[in-house]
Image (cartoon, rainbow, N blue to C red):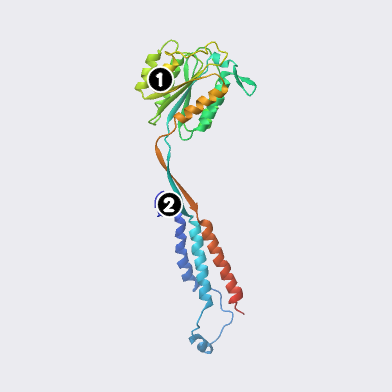
Amino acid sequence: MTDGLLELNGFRFASPWMLLALLLVPLWIWLRGRIGPVAAVQYSSAKLLEAAVHRRPRFRPSGFLVLMRYSALILLVFALARPQLETSFEERQAQAIDLVLNLDFSESMARRDFAHESKRFSRMESMKAVVEEFIRSRSGDRIGSTRFTETARLISPLTMDYTWVLAQLAREETGPGRSLGAGLVMAAEAVMNGPGAVKVIVTVTDAESLAGRPSTEATAGTLVALGIRCHVVHLVPGNDPRSGPPSSTGLAEIARITGGQYLQVRDYPSLRQAHTQLDMLEASTSLREVRSFQELMGWFLAAASLILVAELMFAHLVWRRLP
């Protein structure tokens, strides 16, 4: 018996403790002959019935009917124990990772230059919408988030409560300044608190490169030393004057050094596509067993019902006893 399941060659009882009810069947058999109604006709002497008593009948219907009733009862107990039969077995890729979303909430993220379905949205609104889709597409991963403006702050620590993460993220607004390096340091600290072997940071920003300290080289070196992979989603809308090729010494360099991806997006559809690509890049790599079982309770209930119906038909039609 493992994990509350009684299992043998692909057949198992999901609620094996219900089988203890079988112990009541012998008790019922023993009590049945001791407790019963008083005879309808009483005799002062049994000598008048000696001839009938000593004559053994060829067939006793009552015994057969009782056997049918006991069989139906046993089948009902088996049904309550939830018999199941294994139908398939497979191994799936499933490994939880620790992932922190490092998000830019600087004042430039309030610009409304992202278009979607004939409507214009700010960079922050587009970022929030796509990040929500990304989080909801994950399962089993520990996800946290940080924000950076002139300083960096933790929005939510690593957790598997995605609804709570999204609720915290929805309250965030833009602010002055942009300290992307401080945001990466904060995100690295948050992701290292997780127990997973795979550590990932996804940075979403409209900045071209790190400003001030820590420098690009120092930040990338720290992330590599900690075993953290950093992906960068760079927002460069089509009407932005910085929409040319990315700087080789900026965010693209951090992604390259840490083994991540640098993705430059110019509109809302490409932003969604970038997060879809990251979702596939960070697919799980370990194996877990997935087993499927077919419920057999219905078959046992059907067999018990048929036996009870047959017992009633025999008792009231075929072997009916007249008073």
Nearer to us of marks 2 and 1 is 1
Under circle 2, the secondary element is loop
Under circle 1, the secondary element is helix
Mark 2: few/some/many CA within 10 Å (<14, 14-19, 20+): some
Residue 70 placement (x, y as % from top left): 50, 68
Marks 2 and 1, the one that precedes in the sequence: 2
Return the residue nearer the eye: 281 or 53: 281
Return the residue nearer the eye: 110 or 294: 294
Residue 140 placement (x, y as % from top left): 46, 35
Where residue 256 is drawn, which disc sits there? 1
What residue is shown at x 57% (from left), y 69% (from top)?
310
Return the residue nearer the eye: 214 or 207: 207
Residue linked to disc 2: 5
- Res 218 seen here: yes
Where residue 225 is drawn, which disc sits there? none
Left or right: where 154 falls relative to 237: left
Question: What's the residue type where badge 2 is placed?
Answer: Leu
Instruction: Kindly give the residue lying farthest to the right in the view shown.
Output: 118
- Res 46 seen here: no
Q: Is residue 273 above or below residue 321?
A: above
Residue 5 placement (x, y as % from top left): 43, 52
Question: What's the residue type where badge 1 is placed?
Answer: Arg
Q: How far apart are marks 2 and 1 (CA)?
A: 50 Å
| Among the 4 quarters of the image, the one containing residue 281 | top left
* Number of on-image labels: 2
Mark 1: few/some/many CA within 10 Å (<14, 14-19, 20+): some
What residue is shown at x 56% (from left), y 65% (from top)?
306
